[in-house]
């Protein structure tokens, strides 16, 4: 999976980058499914590996072949200094994150019990995952849908035939 991410950044052809990102998204959906997050895996497979890849490919097929080659200047010296420092800072900060599955993490102590105990009374939805996504986080889900819709409209406008 790391090779797909790095490859998508390093390749000079947009078609290769789209295919690598699509494969990365597909394998990421398999990881989510293996972790038991089937709802997230399904969304990643449909939106990330399926819809996004198809929309990117349709957009690329509507462009001239000379426009799909990437022209990247070499990275500046400040970029080569700032990004590794930022990476080290993020790794240092990650030490303070709770461990995977830690029952004493703030999410396990404060948020999860509230959702598990009160979701049916608050939302009248028997599935806790559905109540979190569609009731508690409905605005976030709606904004994600608007982003997908906007991307689809942008691709449709790019792909329309000029009369």
Image (cartoon, rainbow, N blue to C red):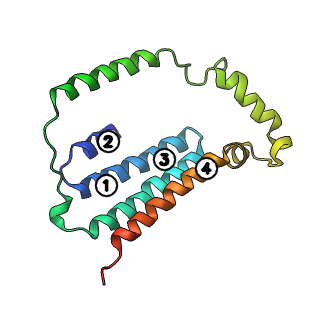
Q: Earlier in the sequence, mark 2 or mark 4?
A: 2
| Secondary structure at numbered mark 1 | helix
Q: Nearer the viewer, mark 1 or mark 4?
A: 4
The residue tagged 1 is: 18
Q: How many marks?
A: 4
As drawn, is 27 to the left or to the right of 132?
left
Q: CA distance from mark 2 to mark 1?
A: 11 Å
Marking on residue 5: 2
Compared to residue 45, the image places residue 152 above or below, namely below
Q: The C terminus is located in which quarter?
A: bottom left
Q: Earlier in the sequence, mark 1 or mark 3?
A: 1
The residue tagged 3 is: 29
As drawn, is 127 to the left or to the right of 89?
right
The residue tagged 4 is: 141
Q: The N terminus is located in which quarter?
A: top left
| Secondary structure at numbered mark 2 | helix
Q: Nearer the viewer, mark 3 or mark 4?
A: 4
Q: Residues within 10 Å of mark 2 (few under 14, many from 20)?
A: some
As drawn, is 135 to the left or to the right of 102?
right
Residue at 55% x, 20% y is 99
* Front residue (pair 97, 146): 146
Q: Earlier in the sequence, mark 1 or mark 4?
A: 1
Quick check: marks 2 and 4 in contact, CB under 8 Å? no
| Secondary structure at numbered mark 3 | helix
Q: Earlier in the sequence, mark 3 or mark 4?
A: 3
């Amino acid at each position: 999976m790391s090779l797909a991410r790095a490859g998508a950044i390093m390749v000079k052809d947009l078609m290769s980058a789209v295919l690598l990102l699509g494969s990365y998204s597909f394998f990421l959906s398999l990881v989510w499914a293996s972790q038991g997050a089937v709802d997230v895996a399904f969304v990643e497979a449909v939106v990330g590996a399926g819809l996004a890849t198809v929309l990117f490919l349709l957009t690329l097929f509507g462009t001239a072949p000379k426009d799909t080659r990437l022209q990247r200047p070499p990275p500046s010296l400040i970029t080569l200094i700032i990004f590794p420092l930022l990476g080290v800072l993020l790794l240092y900060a990650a030490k303070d994150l709770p461990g995977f599955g830690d029952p004493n993490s703030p999410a396990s102590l404060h948020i999860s019990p509230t959702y598990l105990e009160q979701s049916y009374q608050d939302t009248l939805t028997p599935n806790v995952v559905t109540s979190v996504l569609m009731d508690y986080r409905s605005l976030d889900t709606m904004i994600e849908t608007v982003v997908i819709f906007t991307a689809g409209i942008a691709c449709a406008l790019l792909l329309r035939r000029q009369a």
